[in-house]
Amino acid sequence: MTTPEQPSLIRLARENGDECPDPSPLDLGARVRDLRKSRGWTLEQAARQAGLARSTLSKIENGQMSPTYEALKKLAVGLEISVPQLFTAPKAAQVSGRMAVTKTGEGAAYATTTYEHELLAGALTKKTMLPYRARVRARSFDEFDGWVRHDGEEFLYVLTGAIRLITEFYEPVEMKRGDSAYYDASMGHNVISTSAEDATILWVTSLV
């Protein structure tokens, strides 16, 4: 969240990661089979759970028939998932074990005329979230060159002092230590300090 003249933390974070490859088409039959086996069910048990004939479920798993929407709903209910999850590739079973600890004052610093940012967890690449601590220097909306806006969603938590969260579609909100907000970051937004001292806030921005 910076003025346009400054490098954007959001852009810098996105440039750090590689582009995700296009996903391969999902094999519904294999997906259903994997879901069934992950529960330790036989064809008979899964068919009974879903209220389908064993032969129907077998044909679905083997790609010999395309299930109707009603059959998909029964499958989802029987497997205790939603219909969209039938078409969602499973997450990798391997635990990455990634972790990064940032001690106070050790985060990478990015200063602008309106904010002083301290990037947290900077050692990790390909993050899906960008966490950073910010000291809010601005005292007026006029100090910004228009609205700040970018892709993703954003979470804000006030650490010290008091701020005013100004957004494009809502009335300004006065916030103090311990208050938080979650909002669509593509909506214009700016934050100013309203306390005597510069306020500090924790920001977490989605990168996907």
Image (cartoon, rainbow, N blue to C red):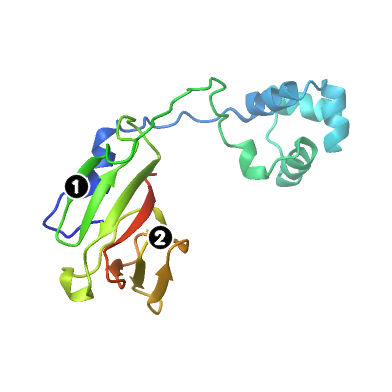
Which residue is disc 1 drawn over? 110
The three-letter code of the residue at mark 1 reads Tyr
**Which quadrant: the N terminus?**
bottom left
The percent coordinates of residue 75 (x first, y second) are: 76, 38
Residue 194, numbered label: none
The three-letter code of the residue at mark 2 reads Val
Mark 1 to mark 2 CA distance (whole Å): 19 Å
Q: Element at badge 1? A: strand
Residue at 30 percent across and 56 percent down: it is 150
The percent coordinates of residue 46 (x first, y second) are: 82, 28
Residue 60 shown left or right of residue 110 in the figure = right
Q: Element at badge 2? A: strand
- For the residue pair 87 and 135, the one nearer the viewer reads as 135
Q: Can residue 52 be seen in this view?
A: no
Q: Which corner quadrant of the image does residue 82 belong to?
A: top right
Q: Which corner quadrant of the image does residue 126 belong to?
A: top left
- For the residue pair 32 and 63, the one nearer the viewer reads as 32
Foreground mark, 1 or 2?
2
| 100 shown above or below 109 | above
Residue at 85 percent across and 34 percent down: it is 49
- For the residue pair 41 and 96, the one nearer the viewer reads as 96
Residue at 24 percent across and 47 percent down: it is 9
Which residue is disc 2 drawn over? 158
**Which quadrant: the C terminus?**
top left
